[in-house]
Amino acid sequence: MKFMATKSPSKPAAPKLAPPEHGGGDSVVLERLTQKVKPPQMYQVVMLNDDYTPMEFVVLVIQEFFNKDRESATQIMLKIHLDGKGVCGVYSRDVAATKVDQVMDAAHKAGHPLQCVSEPVE
């Protein structure tokens, strides 16, 4: 059985566009919405004091992994020694985790119990 169309096919309806505001013809202008993006959460790398790791080793680790000069590294080491902990740097989460791993690996290879952690900056 065949069915025949009783009326001819119609054209699809054209989308209705808002009239141009400045007489620009048939152009359509989309408004760009600005999105506010928060900066990433930062983490501070903190070294903890112990009674066994030599101060000179701590200074060398700070110089090597945190790119501090000798004087800055010595100041951070003294803060660690006197206060029990000291901030070596502030980084994004992944970079801070990498720095902690590097310090812990270097301390382990040298046979020192130096501890290093990363904590969110408040």
Image: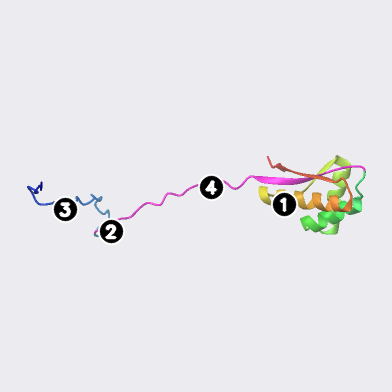
For badge 3, the amino acid type reads Lys
Residue 38 among magenta residues: yes
Disc 3 from disc 4: Cα separation: 44 Å
Residue at the spot 33% in from the left edge and 55% down from the top edge: 29
Left or right: residue 51 versus residue 121 is: right
Q: Which of marks 1 and 2 is in front?
A: 1
Q: Nearer the viewer, mark 3 or mark 4?
A: 3
Q: Which of marks 1 and 4 is in front?
A: 1
Q: Position of residue 47 (x, y in %)?
A: 81, 45
* Disc marking residue 27: 2
For badge 2, the amino acid type reads Ser
Q: How many labels does the image show?
A: 4
Q: What element carries label 4?
A: loop
Which of pointers 1 and 4 lies earlier in the amino acid sequence? 4
Which of pointers 3 and 1 lies earlier in the amino acid sequence? 3
Q: Say above or below: 42 vs 20.
A: above
Q: Do the residues labelled 1 and 2 touch (CB within 8 Å)?
A: no
In the image, 14 versus 8, the foreground residue is 8
Left or right: residue 97 versus residue 49 is: left
Label 1 Cα neighbours within 10 Å, binned few <14 / some 14-19 / many ≥20: some
Label 2 Cα neighbours within 10 Å, binned few <14 / some 14-19 / many ≥20: few
Q: Which of the image's four quarters has the C terminus?
A: top right
Residue that mark 1 sits on: 98
Disc 3 from disc 1: Cα separation: 62 Å
Determine if residue 78 is in view.
Answer: yes
Q: Nearer the viewer, mark 2 or mark 3?
A: 3
Q: Position of residue 12 (x, y in %)?
A: 19, 51
Disc 2 from disc 3: Cα separation: 22 Å
For badge 1, the amino acid type reads Thr
Which span is picked out in magenta?
A: 26-51
